[in-house]
Amino acid sequence: MRLTVETGSAAPAAASGCLAEIGFGREHGLDPAEPRRVQVGLPPLAEPAPRELWWSERPVEIGRWGEIAYATDGRSHFGHLLLAEPAGGSLEALGRHAYEQILGWCRELGDAHLLRVWNYLAEINREQAGLERYRAFCVGRHQALAAAGWPDRQLPAACAVGAPGPGLLISCLAAARPGVQVENPRQVSAFRYPPRYGPQSPSFSRAMRVAASPGQLLLISGTASIVGHVTIHPDQKAGQLTETLANLAALLQAAGGQASYQALRVYVRHPEDWPSLAPLCREAFGPAVPLVPLQGDLCRSDLVLEIDGLAALAAA
Ligand code: 3EB
């Protein structure tokens, strides 16, 4: 499996070997004619807007299961679902439903292992019925995983980012072979956060390491300026970038092997922060790593920046 970032106008999903084509724009959208193509409703902060393409070396088949549109090469499976939010509904119920779908899809694919989930929630920080919507989502997500008897050490790498909306968009990557959880020695595991961050701790691993040929891939969760379980430099863009870079470095070290980033997304809450952060990111990651800057809200209201992506680990 391989990830590339392109900015051309061609529509490559139809190309053989393409597992997913992920674009960014004003609104969430799935292409009814092409299950591999999704638009994430996060405004891109670079022109022309980049697209992420996930590739397999093997023949790819497309399919649908329940509300999920997906592509599979028989070993790796890439799915997307976009759920409308019913008026008066809760993100707890919608999150639970989404994860029930995802886990059902994994079972259908022969008990596939969930490796990575991208969660995009509308109005992520808004309080609704006395609870922040992100926290309600965490409750519903956990309910579905708990009902399936999902062990903490197999929680997928993830991100949860706020989009202008509407709807709940989730993309997910599953595989026939399990990944290996990698936690960050600088951070408390998210699934062990104390209750001050919500009634249910968030169900994700900091990263998942998976076999590739050659070497391994590291699926890196949304990484932010959190040390232990505490936000460091609340609302401060430069300080949060420094701390986030330290967290990424610690995570790569914990993963072992010589790591090189394949592509990174940088989510910033305030678009006006990006012009000053861009050169700092470029300097930190070097000229060759594709960066996809996006405007997104983060799951703590004091976070202004989060970075996730994919790294290749050289064979040990
Ligand atoms: C954090 O470290 C920042 O709820 O799926 C990062 C990645 C975060 C994934 C999720 C949340 C999630 O807690 C927030």
Image (spheres, helix red, strand yellow):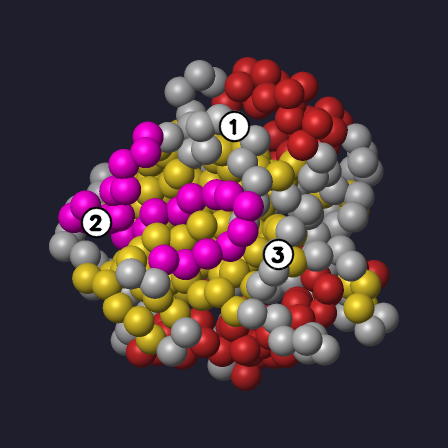
State the residue at coordinates (51%, 73%).
99
Q: Residues within 10 Å of mark 3 (few under 14, many from 20)?
A: many
What percent of the width, then of the height, locates residue 44? 54, 36
* Residue 2 within the segment the image draws in magenta: no
Task: Describe the element under mark 2 as helix, strand or loop.
Answer: helix
Tell whether 148 sits left or right of 224.
left
Residue at the limit of the structure toward the bottom, as seen here: 147
Label 2, label 1: how far apart the Cα atoms are: 25 Å
Residue type marked 1? Ala
Give the answer, above or below, for where 144 lies relative to 284. Answer: below
Label 3, label 1: how far apart the Cα atoms are: 20 Å
Residue type marked 3? Gly
Determine whether label 2 and label 1 are within 8 Å by CB.
no
Q: Residues within 10 Å of mark 2 (few under 14, many from 20)?
A: few
What percent of the width, then of the height, locates residue 150? 50, 74
**Mark number, residue 46:** 1
State the residue at coordinates (21%, 49%).
14
Q: List the residue tagged with mark 2.
A: 14
State the residue at coordinates (28%, 52%).
19
**Mark number, residue 165:** 3
What percent of the width, then of the height, locates residue 46? 52, 28
> Which quarter of the picture shows residue 266?
top right
